[in-house]
Amino acid sequence: MLQQKLQTFIDRYEEINNLLISGDVISDIKRMTELSKEQARITPIVNKAKEYIQVIEDIAENKSILDDKELGELAKEELKELEPLKPALEEDIKLLLLPTDPNDEKNIYLELRAGAGGDEAAIFVGDLFKTYLKYAENNGWKVEIMNQNSSESGGFKEIVALFKGDHVYSKLKFEGGTHRVQRVPDTESQGRVHTSAITVAVMPEVDDVEITINATDLKIDVMRSSGCGGQSVNTTDSAVRITHLPTGIVVTNQDQKSQHKNKDKAMKVLKARLYDMQEKERMEKEGLERKEQVGTGDRSGRIRTYNYPQNRLSDHRINLTLYRLDYIMNDGLLNELIDPLMADHQARLIEANGL
């Protein structure tokens, strides 16, 4: 019964209140911090639980006096207001009771790579990255470029950036996978629509305590930075390539003029990739459904299609189609896709947890 389940949260909240004023906990900073965090985490559920239980009690009380000559009509009016509150509160509580993703509050490394389609794919990497930048700006986030490999025709063969802000992972975690674009390239004289594909990976930023790397597992190469020419390209041997020998993961960084800074950034991205790999393995072992991440970069396995001639944007996971591609891309209105994806994910979680 929902009411009994909610009562356990209320009881635990009161128990924590008593513990926080006990001498043993006051003298133990670590224990006090843990309890305070737990209390903060369950506070929204406790508040909704108290509201829900009060509504249940008020409904029962008003029903008990429906036959009363003096108070019956007043009870009917009260019930008209109270009864719709019950299912609404139950829906709110279902969402609060859902298991939370431990990564939801984290910053992320967003990696975009050009796949099938050559120059046009690289150009679209640049276009989609601009949309992510605009979306970040809309949310008040900060973005730090970790590494970029520019294409001669414009755009990027690959770009990796750190997105920092409030609940970044929770909002962008559904972006991982193959993104397909259909449009007429500027170089196409016949006006034919070309299809290209890029891949996006979303990796949570991790602390040193979450992932450990043995120095003996690394092969570090220093080399001269490469690029399309111009003053921005380093002419010193400051670019760093780190190979993680047990997994074969390779991370390159050449954005900074300092070899030390390039190595530091490359290590951070490597840790994020290793953590992401471990998380996927854990989910697979537990039989959990996981989102697609970077794949082969071909035209199959797509999660989303951007069709410019039709001004159409389709997300194939939830069969969502919007005919406002230009506004979404230019203004960073990704919430029009992300919000329905989050709602669908929550609905699946509710069903899976029997709520």
Image (tube, rainbow, N blue to C red):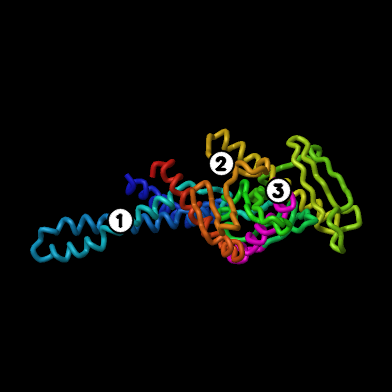
**Residue 37 visible at all:** yes
Per the model, the C-alpha gap separating discs 2 and 1 is 34 Å
Tell me the amino acid under the disc marked 3.
Gly
Q: CA distance from mark 1 to mark 3?
A: 53 Å
Q: Is residue 96 above or below residue 218?
A: below
Task: Indicate yes or no whether the magenta region holds residue 279.
Answer: no
> Can you say whether 251 is above or below 261 in the image?
above
Q: Is residue 140 visible?
A: no
Camera-side mark, 1 or 3: 3
Tell me if mark 2 has few (under 14), some (14-19) or many (20+) residues whose alpha carbon lies within 10 angstroms of its own.
few
- Name the residue at 35% across, 56% down: 89
| Residue 107 x, y percent position in the rendering | 63, 55
Tell me the tag on residue 117.
3
Q: Which mark, residue 86? A: 1
Mark 1 secondary-structure assignment: helix
Q: State the residue at coordinates (84%, 62%).
A: 232
Q: Is residue 313 left or right of residue 343?
A: right
Residue 290: mark in rendering: 2
- Residue 226 position, x and y percent, is 85, 53
Q: What is the chief secondary structure element of the magenta stretch? A: helix
